Amino acid sequence: MARSGGRERGAYHHGDLAAALVRATLEIVDEVGVRGFSVAEAARRTRVSPGAPYRHFADRDALLAAAALEVSHRLQAIHLQAMATASSPHERLAMVAGSYVRAAAVHRGAFELLFAPGLRAHHLELRNSTREFIDLLLPSAFEVVPPGQGAKTAVELLEALSVMARGYVALLLDGMFGDPSAVAADVAARATRAGRALVDGYGLEAPTPS
């Protein structure tokens, strides 16, 4: 058994351990939530000593922040995929809420991690990932808001979309709509319709489909 453990540990040389710990963290958070997470359990699942994670992460929050950053990257990929099919800036923005819901149905525990209090305040990379996402959406927001209203209105629109999307996600994960896996597509469609109404309320009238 000891020799087998040694071989397992050797597999994480050359930087693989950090990625393995992030994967283990996401699994644990999905099972027991952020409060139930421990670095020791992440180490156990990756078959390393309890002290090994601290060679890559300063503390528990640093490992949680790295896992949250991975969630943020996955979420951005889901948004990009959805936005690629949109026919107008209005639709690209409206799809944000729906893609949030679809992502939450797949990565349930990860969403608790993504919005865990305190992580963003102390981890620059995680804050930067939020800015990157805003930068991704801002061009569409500028196309939607009336001329002369500028950055303030565009940012307010994105804030409103984020709040609405997180509201749908919270209700979905709380089971208010039923089993999240079973109702995710319907809730995503409802969230997208609400997104359209919100975007139209902030900006120019949406173009009539040809």
Image: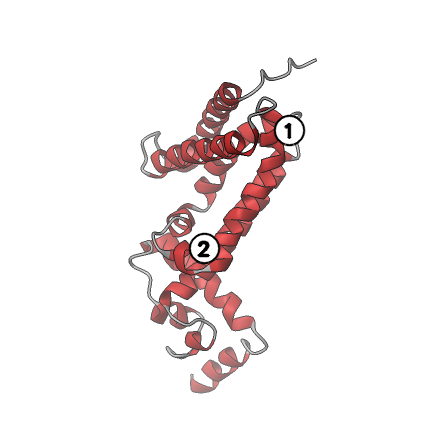
Identify which amino acid the numbered label 2 is placed on.
Ala
At label 1, counting other C-alpha atoms closer than 10 Å, the crowd grade (few under 14, some 14-19, many 20 or more) is some
At label 2, counting other C-alpha atoms closer than 10 Å, the crowd grade (few under 14, some 14-19, many 20 or more) is many
In the orientation shown, which residue stands out farthest toward the left?
35
Tell me the residue at 48%/53% (across/down).
127
Tell me the residue at 45%/81% (across/down).
5
Which residue matches tag 1?
Answer: 86
Q: Position of residue 193 (x, y in %)?
A: 49, 22
Residue 80, placed above or below residue 127: above
Q: Secondary structure at mark 1?
A: loop
Q: Quadrant of the rendered structure where residue 28 is?
A: bottom left
Q: Secondary structure at mark 2?
A: helix
- Is 68 on the left-hand or right-hand side of 39? right
Q: Which mark is residue 68?
A: 2
Q: Earlier in the sequence, mark 2 or mark 1?
A: 2
Query: Quick one: quadrant of the C terminus?
Result: top right
Whether residue 78 is visible, yes or no, is no
Q: Observer-nearest residue: 16 or 126?
A: 126
Query: Quick one: quadrant of the N terminus?
Result: bottom left
Residue 43, placed above or below residue 206: below
- Is 34 on the left-hand or right-hand side of 94? left
Q: Position of residue 160 (x, y in %)?
A: 44, 31
Q: Observer-nearest residue: 136 or 152?
A: 152
Gap in angstroms between the C-alphas marked 2 and 1: 27 Å
Q: Quadrant of the rendered structure where residue 205 is?
A: top right
Residue 108, placed above or below residue 69: above
Identify which amino acid the numbered label 1 is placed on.
Ala
- Is 89 on the left-hand or right-hand side of 61? right
- Is 54 on the left-hand or right-hand side of 83? left
Q: Which mark is residue 205?
A: none
Residue 38, placed above or below residue 85: below
